[in-house]
């Protein structure tokens, strides 16, 4: 009789352990069934939007240097377009947003005749120098 009680106890204990193990294995699946605070689709959409915004801002800054006046301004200041172009890609999102806004404003003012060729050359040189300085200081701070 003592052996049969031990046998039953062993069977019951084994069943409890097996049940516990099977419940633990199903927990991750149940956790994935619950809705997340931010869906994967929302994360993907936000990352795509951020990348598109950055591309548009880089393009706005680069468009300031690509016309003939911009190229002349860079050459007059002995600044290499390739170096400035590379530095644009290294700007932080915040610095890039500020320079893109300024670049768009300069281009709009020039198109409307509110800025002379001489003034735009000075502005292009200042913005190019700012871009290079910001990237140099950023690199120094990360070293």
Image (spheres, grey):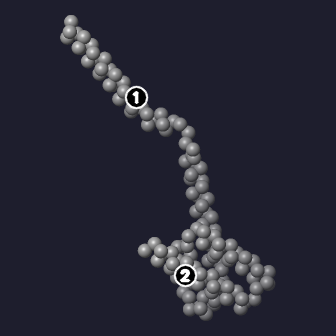
Residue 80, horizontal then vertical, whole percent: 54, 86
In the depicted structure, whether residue 50 falls above or below residue 38: below
Side of 22 where 135 appears, left or right:
right
Residue position for label 2: 133
Give the x, y percent position of residue 134.
55, 78
Locate residue 89 relative to residue 22 in the image: left or right: right
Would you say 134 lies left or right of 115 here?
Answer: left
10 Å neighbourhood of mark 2: few (<14), some, or many (≥20)? few
- The quarter in which the C terminus is drawn is bottom left
Question: Where, by quadrant of the figure, is residue 128 drawn?
Answer: bottom right
Q: Nearer the viewer, residue 117 or 142?
A: 142
For the point 53% across and 37% down, the residue is 34
Q: Is residue 39 above or below residue 128?
A: above
Q: CA distance from mark 1 to mark 2?
A: 59 Å
Q: Which mark is residue 23?
A: 1
Q: Quadrant of the N terminus?
A: top left
Residue in view at x 67 percent, y 85 percent: 123
Where disc 2 sits, the SS reads helix
- Near mark 1 (Cα within 10 A), the count class, few <14, some 14-19 or many ≥20, is few
Q: Position of residue 86 (x, y in %)?
A: 52, 77
Dot 1 or dot 2, earlier in sequence? 1
Residue 99, quarter of the rendered image = bottom right
Contact check, label 1 and label 2, Cβ < 8 Å: no
Dot 1 falls on a residue whose secondary structure is: helix
Q: Position of residue 35 (x, y in %)?
A: 56, 39
Q: Nearer the viewer, residue 137 or 28?
A: 137
Q: Is residue 34 something that shows in the picture?
A: yes
Decide if residue 69 is in sight here. Answer: no
Q: What residue is shown at x 57% (from left), y 57% (from top)?
A: 47
Instruction: Report the residue that reaches farthest toward the bottom.
Output: 76
The extreme top residue here reads: 1
């Amino acid at each position: 009789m003592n052996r049969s009680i031990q046998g039953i106890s062993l069977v019951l204990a084994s069943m409890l352990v097996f049940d516990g193990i099977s419940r633990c294995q199903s927990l991750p699946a149940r956790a994935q069934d619950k809705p997340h605070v931010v869906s994967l689709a929302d994360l993907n959409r936000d990352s795509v939007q951020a990348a598109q915004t950055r591309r548009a801002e880089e393009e706005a800054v680069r468009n300031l240097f690509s016309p003939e006046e911009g190229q002349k301004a860079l050459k007059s200041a002995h600044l290499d377009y390739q170096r400035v172009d590379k530095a644009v890609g290294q700007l932080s999102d915040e610095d890039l947003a500020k320079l893109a806004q300024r670049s768009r404003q300069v281009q709009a003012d020039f198109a409307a005749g509110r800025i002379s060729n001489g003034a735009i050359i000075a502005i292009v040189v200042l913005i190019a120098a700012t871009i290079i300085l910001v990237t140099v200081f950023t690199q120094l701070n990360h070293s």
